[in-house]
Amino acid sequence: MTEGNLLRQILEYGNRPNPYPLYAELRKTPVLNEGDGAYVVSTYWEILSLLHDPRVSSDPHNLAVPGGPGFDPEDGSALPPSFIRLDPPEHDRLRRMTNTSFGPPHKPRRVHEMRAELGDIVSGLIEGIGNTDRIDLVEQFSYPFPVTVICRLLGVPREDESRFHTWADTLAASLDPMPGEDPTERNKIAQKARTELGMYLAGLIEERRKNPRDDMLSELATLKGPDGSMSTMELLSTSALLLIAGHETTVNLITNGMLTLLRNPDVLQRLREDPKLAVPIVEELLRFEPPVQLVPNRTTLTDIEIGGVTIPKGASLWLVVAAGNRDPQRFADPERFDPDREDIEHLGFGSGIHSCFGAPLARLEAQLALSELARRLVNPRLLEDPPEYRQNAVLRGPRHLPIACDDIRP
Ligand code: HEM
């Protein structure tokens, strides 16, 4: 098997249920020259080092050959790039400003204070399940949950949530390419959704500037701090980023989580008895089945020597965090799902200046979701294993997760 074949195999749909043996092969060449200016990095320490390297850029304008694989939330957007695709100092300015309304030191309790509301959303979804002979956990639970949460966080009025869900679903679906399908129609639909979402948010921002409330959009719209204010365009691209970056990813964490727990009934039973175990379970899931399998869209600003290879300036990097997370040089017994492991500095949220902004929220969502599903579903079981996966190799996760249970506990 040639190395080039290996990457193609990883991207092949048939390998979506279990790409991990291929990642193990890939790690034999930590830094792999794919040709066409692309380099694939698959070992933990090399990935970590590149994620922290100021000679590596997230701005696609620095690519020698434009294009590349996609975890590209802004593909085809009329909006300016959001901070995930910017380098310092612009990245840092926008991230800092967004954070004044999201976490420490300005809003240390923002996520914590959402706990009760998140719990209510989870309960509402579980109560709405209906027929327990066949539940599609994705459609009925993991998919609607994160988008409802982001609506509440941003301050989208309840009566508009369903419109917001539709836009979010369309945009998330556009990140999941279908081989053989002509993407023109889907791109057109995504573009339309993006424009409608942008216009909707612009109206809401205008309204919140006049009548601010206790929500993130109001705070960002009226912010006047050491970094100045956010322009309407910056605010639009930031809110669209928060919506899209936290959608498919959180869906996959919860779905991968339930799938893994149903394959490990002893751990599921322990979680049922001790909901606090959700904390280490979610961390181990982010290592073992990370929703973002690889971080593409990085470029070298200069030649970089790493893993015995000189990556030339302008190369595009694919950092396969899911392979790094199972690197035996970093983690003992890495192919085992073990929520009791103490050393668990995974790459599931990336690392360095672009490490996941929404991580505290994503963690809490997944912890609440999994502990409640474990507690309330009586004798849950998988109806298909492996389930049907989405096409996307980057944001990898099941398209449907059919399960059944005997009853739902109050
Ligand atoms: C389980 C769920 C999630 C996973 C696995 C995840 C994963 C990631 C990863 C790997 C990155 C790094 C990308 C890079 O280095 O280019 C990232 C960045 C980001 N994530 Fe998440 N994410 C999740 C949920 C969320 C949520 C809920 C939000 C919003 C509330 C969010 C907002 C962001 C933002 C804004 C960035 C860009 C950070 C920056 O460029 O400084 N994410 N995420």
Image: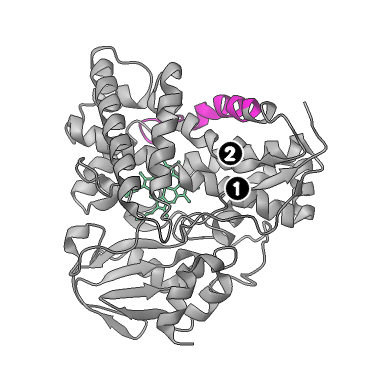
Task: Give above or below for 343 relative to 402.
Answer: below
Task: Give above or below for 107 relative to 291.
Answer: above
Amino acid type, label 2: Glu
User: Residue 141 at x, y = what percent?
Assistant: 60, 36
Q: How many marks?
A: 2
Please name the residue shown 19% across and 74% down the image. 313
Disc 2/disc 1 C-alpha distance (Å): 7 Å
- Residue 388 or 357: which is nearer the viewer? 388
Dot 1: what SS? loop
Q: How is the image coloured?
A: one colour
Please name the residue shown 41% across and 55% down the image. 177
Mark 2 or mark 1: which comes first in sequence?
2
Q: Is 79 positioned to the left or the right of 268 in the image?
A: left
Q: Tell me, yes or no, whether the highlighted magenta stretch contains residue 112.
A: yes
Task: Give above or below for 45 relative to 115.
Answer: below
Assign the magenta stretch its main secondary structure: helix
Q: Tell me, yes or no, whether the highlighted magenta stretch contains residue 274.
A: no
- Residue 391 or 268: which is nearer the viewer? 391
Name the disc covering residue 400, or none.
1
Residue 135 visible in the snapshot = yes
Name the disc covering residue 139, or none.
2
Amino acid type, label 1: His
Q: Are marks 2 and 1 in contact (CB under 8 Å)?
A: yes
User: Residue 265 at x, y = what percent?
Assistant: 78, 53
Please state the extent of the stretch shown in magenta in the rendering.
Answer: 104-124
User: Residue 107 at x, y = what percent?
Assistant: 39, 30
Please name the residue shown 31% across and 84% down the image. 309
Dot 2: what SS? helix
